[in-house]
């Protein structure tokens, strides 16, 4: 694996997320973090905006403009759109997309077909060599966990569309699982609740604001209200609604407990010696979902294990990929190359 690196080649790490794509360039750090969006003019199929610019068109674009979300649950849903988006983001991150070697984070549950799609998209975007790394492993490295020591380490990476859980030790993954649940599922639950309870429809940005402001994984001590404006389903007119934090707590509990059950399964499958280390040293939460109020307390109470939020949890995966790029001699146990993936049989 050490032969894949060369001073003549620029090494790049990409966290290809459902909501946000982040790029790490060796020697410069995290250089880009933009929404995983691309807007096209449906009349001539031309790209008119990518990333932040496309996000600005979500709620205000005319009928002739379509905003695409090319990634679903952490994997590619639209290959052509993803390839175009990656090409734009890479050209924005580095001066030249020639002679790039890229490591991309993927969920542990990604199928071989999905992994191939990621590799193909990266190659088509201009990479000369491409490799894959599980997001949970990258998050552990980005959180400075001692995964190369004979010690059990556990990380939960909760992104927008996928939550990945892994136990790592001695530079390898002991147990890893992922589920197609994340921050977007919490948003969807809130949006559906507001529709059913208050007969209003709200935009994605309003729902996200509700989750950030009054969302809580544990029963809030103060039942704070949040006032917002939505469109009534009965008459189509705007009206102001007040929703309380206790309501949001109950709404998001169901998807959170589904994630919690997956964490329990990983703990059950983890070898006893590593489980003992996890019980003593705790679990680290990463990803944008880790910022949900009280999530660490909920997991700690239910699992009876210390749980803490990693430093800069939203950047943990891409930072971890960047650190792996610099720890080149330790990469073989954590990185899959194109040759290995294409050689597999179904």
Image (cartoon, rainbow, N blue to C red):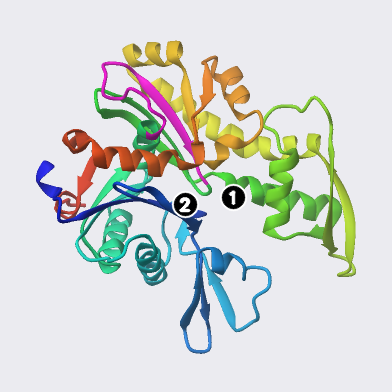
As drawn, the label of residue 149 is none
List x then y, in percent, for residue 312: 50, 36
Q: Is residue 128 left or right of residue 159?
A: left
Mark yes or no: residue 28 visible.
yes
> 311 or 256: which is nearer to us?
311
Q: Residue 92, located in which quarter of the rendered image? A: bottom left
What residue sits right under mark 2 in the picture? 73
The reply, left or right, for residue 161 in relation to residue 201 is left
- Tell me which residue sits at (32%, 17%) in the image: 271
Residue 170 appears at what percent x and percent y? 24, 23
Furthest residue in direction left, as rendered: 3
User: Which residue is depicted at the point 12% across and 41% down?
Assistant: 2
Q: Residue at x 89, y 68 (%)?
A: 237
Q: Which mark is residue 184?
A: 1
Question: 131 or 54, which is in the foreground?
Answer: 54
Which span is picked out in magenta? 142-159
Dot 1 lies on which element? Answer: helix
Among the two numbered marks 1 and 2 on one chain, the one whose residue lies closer to the N terminus: 2
Q: Residues within 10 Å of mark 1 (few under 14, many from 20)?
A: many
Name the spot of residue 320 as percent of width and height, x first.
36, 38
């Amino acid at each position: 694996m050490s032969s894949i690196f060369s001073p003549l080649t620029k090494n790049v790490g990409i966290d290809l997320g459902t909501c946000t794509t982040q790029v790490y360039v060796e020697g410069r750090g995290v250089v880009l973090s933009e929404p995983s969006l691309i807007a096209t003019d449906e009349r001539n199929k031309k790209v008119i905006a990518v990333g932040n610019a496309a996000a600005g068109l979500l709620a205000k674009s005319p009928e002739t403009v379509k905003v695409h979300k090319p990634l679903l649950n952490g994997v590619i849903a639209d290959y052509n759109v993803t390839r175009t988006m990656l090409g734009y983001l890479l050209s924005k991150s580095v001066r030249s997309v020639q002679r790039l070697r890229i490591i991309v984070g993927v969920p542990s549950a990604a199928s071989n077909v999905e992994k191939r799609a990621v590799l193909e998209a990266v190659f088509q975007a201009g990479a000369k060599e491409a490799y894959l790394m599980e997001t949970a492993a990258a998050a552990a490295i980005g959180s400075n966990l001692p995964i190369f020591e004979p010690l059990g380490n556990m990380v939960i990476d909760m992104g927008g569309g996928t939550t990945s859980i892994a136990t790592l030790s001695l530079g390898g993954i002991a147990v890893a699982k992922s589920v197609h649940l994340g921050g977007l599922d919490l948003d969807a639950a809130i949006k559906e609740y507001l529709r059913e309870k208050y007969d209003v429809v709200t935009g994605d940005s309003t729902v996200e604001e509700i989750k950030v402001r009054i969302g809580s994984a544990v029963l809030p001590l103060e039942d704070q209200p949040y006032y917002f404006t939505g469109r009534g389903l009965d008459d189509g007119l705007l009206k102001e609604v007040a929703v309380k934090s206790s309501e949001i707590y109950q709404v998001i509990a169901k998807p959170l407990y589904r994630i919690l059950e997956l964490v329990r399964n990983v703990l059950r499958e983890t070898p006893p010696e590593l489980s003992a280390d996890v019980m003593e040293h705790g679990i680290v939460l990463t990803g944008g979902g880790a910022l949900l109020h009280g999530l660490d307390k909920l997991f700690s109470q239910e699992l009876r294990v210390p749980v803490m939020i990693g430093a800069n949890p939203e950047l943990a995966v891409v930072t971890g990929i960047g650190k792996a790029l610099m720890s080149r001699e330790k990469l073989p146990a954590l990185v899959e190359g194109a040759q290995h993936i294409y050689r597999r049989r179904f």
